Image (spheres, helix red, strand yellow):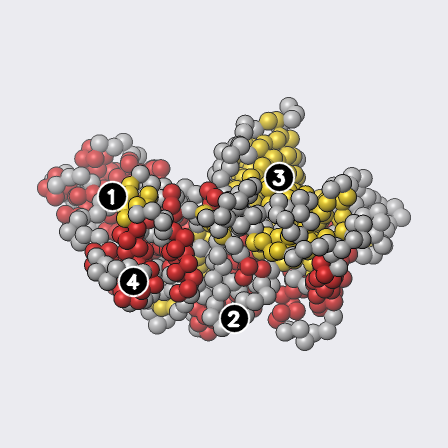
C-alpha cells in the first residue's frame, strides 16, 4: 500500500483540488453564481488536472479567470477548436493554461482543464454564471447547485470519445477530498418570506426592515451526497414586471451588448374556479424509466423505497385519477422499450384493470437508459382527434445524448405537451427541464426526502386544467427605437409556471424616455390584458445579468436550428460564435481559454494527468436492506470489466465487510451483488464476474420470502379498490381498510341508498377524515367519486354522510366533500 500525504483519491493518487467556495447573488427571479476552486500541486512533477462537473441546464457561463500565485489571468471566449489548440500549444511550451468547455452531449456538463501546475504551485480558478430560477408548484423559486454528477449512460453505437461525460471520475460521496462553502445574498422587489433548503443552513439574516434583502449560508460540514437546493419564497409573486438593463458602455451600439435589453416576467394567477375545472379529454402517455439505476433507493437511509417502486405507486394514482372518456398508454424504456398496449386505448374499467395488473409487474430490468427510441416510436403514432396528447416522462436523467433528445422533442412540440420528472440526486437539469420547456410542459425534480406522488399529481392538475393560451406581446416604443425579440414566442403557460421574455432595444428617441408592453392572453376562454411601462434609459448597471441571459436564450435557439439543419444552413454556427464571443456567454461551439506565460521558462518533468473525482452515492453507508439495491454503483448496464472493477472497490480486503451496523462476509456480499446482476446475465456469468464460489448460495439469487405478507399503505389499498368510474364497491377489502368488519360497514347503510353509493361516501369520509395530509395524492380520484355520486341523483346524501361520520368517528361536512 502506497502512503501519500495530502489529498488522495480512493486509489491513493494525489488530488490537486483543495476547496470550492460559492457566492450566490439572487435578484428576484434571476441569480448570479460565482464559484472559486482552489488547487495545489503537491506532487514532484508538473500536473494537469481535469475536473468534470455539472451546472444548471439553463446556466449562462459569463466569466472565467485563473490566478497563479499573485497573477490573475482572465479568460476570453474563442471558437472551441481554436481554444483547444491554443491550450495544447501552451502546455507543450511549458506555460500554464486553463480551458473551460461545454460537453458535446449535454449543456449541463462542463469540463475544466487546469493545465500545467509546477510542483508546489497553487492556483485558484473562478467561474461565474447566470441562471433563471425555476418556479415550483408552491410559488417557491428553486436554485440548484449540482454537487453530484452520476455516471451518464452512453447509448450503444454513439461516439463517447469527445464528450466531457466520458471522463467522469466518481468516488463515494463521503470520500470527496475537498470542501464546499456557500453563501447567498437575496434581493427582491417584494418582501422575502423565507428561504428553505434540503441541506442544513445557518439562520436567515434580513438586511433591512422591509425584508427585501437577506443573506443565508450553507452550514459547515457539507457532505457531497446530494444536490444543494435553495427554495426562495417572496410575497406578491404574481405581479408581472418589465425590467430594462442598460447597455455595456464599452460595447458598440447596435450590438446585443451595446443596446439596452428588457426582460418581461409573466406569472399569471389562476382563480379558484379555474383551478377546480377539469377536462375529460386527452391522450395520456406515461413513459417510465426501467433501467438498472431505477432500482436505487429514493434516498439514503433505512426503509427508503426504491425508485421503480415509487414509480409503481405513482402509476396506480395516475390510473385511478384519469377522467372517463380519455385515452392512455404506458411505455417502459431502458436499452429497449415496451408498451402496455400496441396503441393508446380508451380509459375504462377493463383497460384500467389490465394496466394495473401490468404495473404490478414493472421492474428495473431493461438495462441502460435510452430515451430517444421510445420517443421516436411515440411521435410516429398519429394523434387522436379531439384528444390532446399529454406525455409524462419519468427518469433519473442519466443519459449521454441529451441534445439529440431535446432536438427530437422540439421537432414534435406542436403535437403534444411533456411533463418531466427528474428522480434522485444527479438527474440532468438540461434533460428534465429541456424536454418540458421544448414541449410546453412542466418539469419537477424529486430529490432527498421528496415523495414522487404529490409532485406528479400537481403536474396532472396542470394537464387537466385550462392553461393560459393565445398569448400575444405588443411592444410600444417611441419613433427611432426598435424592438428585437431574443426569446421564442410563448405559446402556453400553466398554473404555477412563469415565463420570461427577453428583447433588445435598438436606437434612441429624441423625446420620450418610456416604452410600454401590452400582454394579452386567454384563460378558461376569458380574455386577460396587462400593460406595463418601462424606462428606455435605465441608470443602474446590474452587472449585465439580463443581457447575458438574453444572449443565452438566443444562442440556444440558434444551436437547435444549426443541429436541425445538420450544419447545412450557412451562417448559423458563425452567428452563435460571434454572439458568444461578444457577450462572453458559453455555447456549444466556443470555450473559455486563459494562458499564463509566467517568466517564459519551460517546465521540466513528465506532465501527469489527474482526474478530480466528482461524488456519487455511497452505498457503504446504507443499511443491509439498501445494500441489496446496489445498482446505483453497479448500474448493471456497465461493461463487464467495469462491473468487475466496481465490485472490487466495494469489497474489503478483510474477511468481514461492514454495512451500516450489520456485518456480512465478503463472499456473501458478492452473492448479493450477483443477485442484482441476475436480471442482465445468467447466474453462472454473474458469479464469474464477481468471482463467487462455485457453491454460491442459491438464496443469494432468490426473491424475498413469498410467504411473508408485506405491510401495505392503507391509502394505496383504498385507492386500488376504486373503480374507473370513481365509485367503490361494498366489499371485505374496503371494510379492512376502514378497520371494520363487513357487517359493521353494511349495517348503518341508510335503507334508500344503494350499496355502491354508501361505499363511495364511506371512502370519501375516510379520506377527508384521516388522510388530509396526503390530499394532493388523492384529490382527483375524490373529484371523480363526487361526480359519480352526483350523477346517481341520490336524495339522502346528507343522511349518508352523517351515518358515515358516526361509523368512522369523523366530523366531515357534506360541503367539504364537494357534495
Question: Which residue was labeled with disc 3?
Answer: 21
Residue at horizontal 21 percent and vertical 47 percent from the top: 710
Which of the two marks, 3 or 4, is nearer to us in this view? Answer: 4
Closer to the N terminus: mark 3 or mark 4? Answer: 3
The answer to whether one can see residue 748 in this image is yes
Closer to the N terminus: mark 4 or mark 1? Answer: 4
Residue at horizontal 54 percent and vertical 67 percent from the top: 160
Answer left or right for 72 relative to 131.
Answer: right
SS class, disc 1:
helix
| Image coords of residue 532 (percent x, y) | 70, 44
Mark sitting on residue 158: 2
Mark sitting on residue 714: 1
Answer left or right for 478 relative to 743.
Answer: right
Tell me, yes or no, whether the two marked residues, 1 and 2, touch with CB atoms within 8 Å.
Answer: no
The answer to whether one can see residue 359 in this image is no
Q: Is residue 37 above or below residue 113?
A: above
Q: Which of 306 and 549 is in front in this view?
A: 306
Gap in angstroms between the C-alphas marked 3 and 4? 45 Å
| Image coords of residue 663 (percent x, y) | 28, 43
Mark sitting on residue 687: 4
Which of the two marks, 4 or 1, is nearer to us in this view? Answer: 4
Gap in angstroms between the C-alphas marked 1 and 2? 46 Å
Closer to the N terminus: mark 2 or mark 3? Answer: 3
Answer left or right for 67 relative to 282.
Answer: right
Q: Nearer the viewer, residue 94 or 683?
A: 94
Amino acid at each position: 500500500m502506497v502512503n501519500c500525504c495530502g489529498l488522495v483519491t480512493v486509489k491513493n493518487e494525489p488530488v490537486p483540488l483543495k476547496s470550492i467556495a460559492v457566492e450566490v447573488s439572487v435578484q428576484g427571479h434571476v441569480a448570479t453564481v460565482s464559484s472559486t476552486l482552489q488547487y495545489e500541486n503537491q506532487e514532484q512533477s508538473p500536473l494537469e488536472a481535469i475536473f468534470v462537473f455539472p451546472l444548471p441546464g439553463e446556466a449562462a457561463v459569463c466569466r472565467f479567470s485563473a490566478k497563479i500565485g499573485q497573477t490573475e489571468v482572465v479568460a476570453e471566449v474563442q471558437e472551441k477548436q481554436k481554444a483547444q489548440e491554443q491550450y495544447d500549444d501552451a502546455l507543450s511550451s511549458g506555460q500554464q493554461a486553463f480551458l473551460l468547455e461545454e460537453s458535446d452531449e449535454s449543456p449541463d456538463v462542463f469540463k475544466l482543464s487546469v493545465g500545467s501546475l509546477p510542483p508546489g504551485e497553487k492556483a485558484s480558478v473562478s467561474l461565474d454564471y447566470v441562471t433563471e430560477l425555476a418556479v415550483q408548484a408552491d410559488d417557491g423559486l428553486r436554485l440548484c447547485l449540482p454537487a453530484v454528477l452520476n455516471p451518464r449512460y452512453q447509448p450503444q453505437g454513439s461516439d463517447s470519445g469527445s464528450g466531457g461525460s466520458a471522463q467522469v471520475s466518481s468516488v463515494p460521496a463521503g470520500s470527496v477530498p475537498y470542501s464546499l462553502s456557500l453563501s447567498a445574498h437575496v434581493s427582491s422587489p417584494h418582501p422575502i418570506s423565507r428561504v428553505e433548503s434540503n441541506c442544513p443552513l445557518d439562520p436567515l439574516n434580513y438586511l433591512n426592515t422591509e425584508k427585501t434583502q437577506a443573506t443565508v449560508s450553507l452550514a459547515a460540514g457539507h457532505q457531497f451526497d446530494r444536490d444543494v437546493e435553495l427554495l426562495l419564497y417572496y410575497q406578491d409573486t404574481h405581479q408581472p414586471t418589465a425590467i430594462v438593463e442598460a447597455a455595456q458602455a464599452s460595447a458598440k451600439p447596435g450590438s446585443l451588448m451595446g443596446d439596452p435589453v428588457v426582460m418581461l416576467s409573466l406569472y399569471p394567477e389562476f382563480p379558484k374556479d379555474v383551478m377546480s375545472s377539469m377536462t375529460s379529454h386527452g391522450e395520456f402517455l406515461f413513459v417510465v424509466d426501467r433501467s438498472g439505476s431505477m432500482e436505487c433507493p429514493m434516498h439514503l437511509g433505512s426503509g427508503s423505497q426504491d425508485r421503480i417502486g415509487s414509480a409503481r405507486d405513482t402509476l396506480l394514482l395516475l390510473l385511478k385519477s384519469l377522467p372517463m372518456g380519455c385515452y392512455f398508454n404506458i411505455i417502459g424504456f431502458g436499452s429497449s422499450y415496451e408498451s402496455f398496449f400496441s396503441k393508446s386505448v380508451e380509459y375504462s374499467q377493463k383497460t384500467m384493470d389490465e394496466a394495473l395488473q401490468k404495473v404490478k409487474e414493472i421492474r428495473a430490468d431493461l438495462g441502460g437508459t435510452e430515451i430517444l427510441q421510445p420517443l421516436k416510436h411515440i411521435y410516429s403514432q398519429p394523434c387522436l382527434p379531439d384528444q390532446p396528447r399529454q406525455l409524462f416522462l419519468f427518469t433519473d436523467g442519466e443519459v449521454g445524448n441529451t441534445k439529440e433528445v431535446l432536438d427530437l422533442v422540439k421537432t414534435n412540440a406542436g403535437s403534444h405537451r411533456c411533463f418531466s420528472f427528474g428522480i434522485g440526486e444527479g438527474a440532468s437539469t438540461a434533460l428534465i427541464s429541456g424536454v418540458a420547456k421544448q414541449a410546453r410542459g412542466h418539469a419537477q425534480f424529486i430529490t432527498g426526502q421528496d415523495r414522487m406522488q404529490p409532485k406528479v399529481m400537481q403536474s396532472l392538475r396542470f394537464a387537466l386544467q385550462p392553461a393560459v393560451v393565445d398569448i400575444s406581446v405588443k411592444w410600444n416604443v417611441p419613433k427611432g427605437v426598435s424592438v428585437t425579440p431574443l426569446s421564442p414566442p410563448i405559446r402556453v403557460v400553466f398554473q404555477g409556471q412563469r415565463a420570461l421574455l427577453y428583447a433588445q432595444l435598438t436606437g434612441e428617441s429624441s423625446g420620450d424616455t418610456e416604452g410600454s408592453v401590452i400582454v394579452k392572453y386567454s384563460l378558461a376562454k376569458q380574455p386577460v390584458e396587462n400593460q406595463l411601462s418601462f424606462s428606455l434609459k435605465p441608470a443602474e448597471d446590474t452587472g449585465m445579468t439580463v443581457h447575458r441571459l438574453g444572449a443565452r436564450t438566443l444562442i440556444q435557439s440558434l444551436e437547435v436550428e444549426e443541429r436541425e439543419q445538420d450544419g447545412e444552413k450557412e451562417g448559423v454556427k458563425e452567428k452563435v460564435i460571434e454572439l458568444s464571443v461578444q457577450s462572453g456567454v458559453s455555447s456549444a461551439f466556443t470555450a473559455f481559454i486563459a494562458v499564463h506565460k509566467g517568466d517564459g521558462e519551460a517546465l521540466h518533468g513528465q506532465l501527469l494527468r489527474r482526474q478530480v473525482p466528482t461524488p456519487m452515492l455511497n452505498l457503504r453507508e446504507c443499511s443491509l436492506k439498501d445494500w441489496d439495491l446496489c445498482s446505483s454503483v453497479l448500474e448493471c448496464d456497465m461493461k463487464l470489466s467495469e462491473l468487475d472493477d466496481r465490485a472490487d472497490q466495494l469489497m474489503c480486503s478483510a474477511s468481514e465487510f461492514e454495512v451500516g451496523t450489520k456485518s456480512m462476509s465478503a463472499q456473501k456480499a458478492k452473492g448479493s451483488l450477483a443477485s442484482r446482476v441476475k436480471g442482465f446475465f445468467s447466474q453462472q456469468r454473474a458469479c464469474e464476474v464477481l468471482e463467487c464460489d462455485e457453491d454460491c448460495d442459491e438464496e443469494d439469487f432468490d426473491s424475498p420470502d413469498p410467504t411473508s405478507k408485506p405491510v401495505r399503505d392503507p391509502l394505496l389499498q383504498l385507492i386500488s379498490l376504486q373503480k374507473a368510474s370513481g365509485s367503490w364497491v361494498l366489499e371485505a377489502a374496503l371494510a379492512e381498510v376502514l378497520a371494520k368488519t363487513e357487517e359493521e360497514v353494511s349495517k348503518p347503510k341508510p335503507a334508500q341508498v344503494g350499496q355502491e353509493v354508501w361505499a363511495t361516501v364511506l371512502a370519501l369520509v375516510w379520506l377527508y377524515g384521516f388522510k388530509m395530509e396526503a390530499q394532493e395524492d388523492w384529490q382527483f380520484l375524490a373529484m371523480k367519486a363526487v361526480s359519480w355520486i352526483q350523477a346517481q341523483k341520490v336524495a339522502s346524501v346528507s343522511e349518508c354522510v352523517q351515518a358515515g361520520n358516526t361509523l368512522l368517528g369523523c366530523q366531515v361536512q357534506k360541503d367539504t366533500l364537494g357534495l
